[in-house]
Image: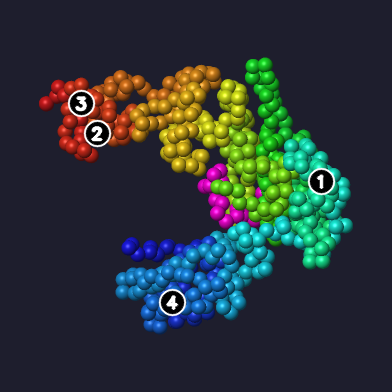
Amino acid sequence: MTPPQLPARESLTVEFKSDRTRLPDRDLIEAIVCLANAEGGELWLGVEDDGAPTGLHIEHQQLMGMAGLVAARTSPSLAVTVTPVQFGNVVVAHIAVPKAPGEVATTGGVYLRRRLKADGEPECVAMLPHDRASRARSFGQMDASAQIVAGATLADLDPLERERLRQSVQQYGGDRVLLELDDEALDGALGLTGRLSGGHRVPTLTGLLLIGREPALRELVPTHEFAFQVLARESVRFNEFRRFPLLKALDWLETNFRPYNPEEELQVGLFRVPVPLVDLGAFREAVANALIHRDYHRLGAVHVRLEDGALVVSNPGGLVDGVTLSNLLTIEPHPRNPQLADAMKRIGVVERSGRGVDKIFRGLLKFGRPAPDYSRTSREDVVLRLPTDPADLEFRRLVVDAERGGSSELPIDSLIALSALRTQKRLTAEELAAYIQRDAAQARQTLEALTEAGLVEPHGATRGRSYTLSAQVYRLAGGQAAYTRQAGFSAIQHEQMVLSYIRQHGLIVRGDVMELCRLSSDQAATLLRRLKAKGVLKQQGERRWASYTLAGEA
């Protein structure tokens, strides 16, 4: 087995501990607990803070009992793997620490977690009660939105907001069964109230957030706040903070956003297709997701900010455990506040399938705009940037025609593929797989379906096949010359280019053919074999050392 490699420096998942003067067991256990309560990682015992290995203290050189010590001094017991690693004439201990599925403490009752400071350096800090609650929710172990709010009473629920809820069910096409229920049954069906041991009902966090009175929200849910901001270069045109219940909040945000969302029209056949600065469906989904999935144990507002070049929506609380930037499009829904999310789905405010991210992507890509950008997301905040670049009207026309021809919306993978081909010009199935966050086989299926629809054309053999937008698509956009450039040269042209190269340079190898003709390795090999079979070229050497010259030359 390859020994672990010593990292260059400490990070969120790497800790160095000097052992020249014996590291106390308490300090060792606390450092391991600190890593386990963050992302897990590795602790290097016998390494200085600057990364220099100085070795283990004589009392730590027998590593057999170290894993048992950790298990005995942590609660619940933490299983670590201890491996000796030699550097020159010194031996250090590599301790692999798993990410704890819940919070873990020392048997002395100390809870610690690892975090990065503002300068990027790691540190261990106390794990406070709200940190523990947030971590439990991130693992799906606790639903804060289903909890009864201490001190809340039914008088804190607003009858006008309950009526707004009923109207929202009708407006957004929600579960119409809800409209047949009386107030008590409605509250129970959506989890707006819970029952105490005595039998009387009191509001849950979901209830207060959806239909709570504003004074009650201010007092009982002080973390709930949102802001709408419009920034123009260095000036602020709009900047207001509110604490409305969520359905009123969505109405208020959309009402204030509409004047800043100009719209043009595109004529497609007999129909006029609106082309807004920001698709309202994507706007609603992004804002609703931020309000629903924020961490209600953290102070901080949900920000909806229109700035030069983008609409930015951010909320406190990073992505929940298991969700990453590389699986946003494919992972099963992981709501931070399940009961609140379920209530909003039944009302119809958000996508009932739980695939709201698809809706956000569709709202940008169908207008030929760049994909949503989550790259500024951190452990503390989710930040979504929706670019407001000028729409590509011809691309929008293409999407409308394709969807009308198929009598349904294009699958999101197909829309991502068309958008990627529009910007990258040529893709392989392996390259598209990264865009759609699926494997190459599924990407190939998407491309072949688009090929059958006449929107995409394949080039080359099966293994080295690449794809471009079809000649029809380029022709509709007035880009016939661009199509010719992207489709590449014909086989005869490739042959002439190879022969011309040899005449100029004396010989050619497969790598030269790949660069000259923009072919894959397999395609270049096939071209050379064809020329050799025709008697035009002769081969010198075998396999990777093969080169080719003109057959008529000595």
| Residue ID at (53%, 36%) | 413
Q: CA distance from mark 2 to mark 3?
A: 13 Å
Q: Which mark is residue 509?
A: 2
Describe residue 21's horizontal placement relative to residue 255 as left or right.
left
Q: Are marks 4 and 3 in contact (CB under 8 Å)?
A: no
**Mark 3: secondary structure:** helix
Q: Which quarter of the picture shows residue 18?
A: bottom left
105 vs 185, left or right, is left
Secondary structure beneath dot 2 equals: loop
User: Mark 1 highlights which residue?
Assistant: 181
Whole-Å distance between the Cαs marked 2 and 1? 77 Å
Q: Which residue type carries mark 1?
A: Leu
**Looking at the figure, which quarter contains the N terminus?**
bottom left
* Residue situated furthest left in the rendering: 554
Write the residue at 24% across / 33% down.
509
Q: Could you tell me which quadrant the C terminus lies in?
A: top left
Residue type at mark 4? Answer: Met
In the picture shown, does residue 210 fall above or below 432?
A: below
User: Which of these two is toward me, 182 or 256?
Assistant: 182
Q: Earlier in the sequence, mark 4 or mark 3?
A: 4
Report, in whole angstroms, how far the alpha carbon at label 4 lies from the one at label 3.
66 Å
Mark 2: amino acid = Val
Rendered location of residue 119, percent (x, y) = 57, 61
Q: Earlier in the sequence, mark 3 or mark 1?
A: 1
* Residue 324 within the magenta-colored segment of the rendering: yes
Q: Which residue is mark 3?
A: 532
Residue 33 within the segment the image draws in magenta: no
Do the residues bearing badges 2 and 3 touch, measured as CB atoms within 8 Å?
Answer: no
Residue placed under numbered mark 4 in the picture: 66
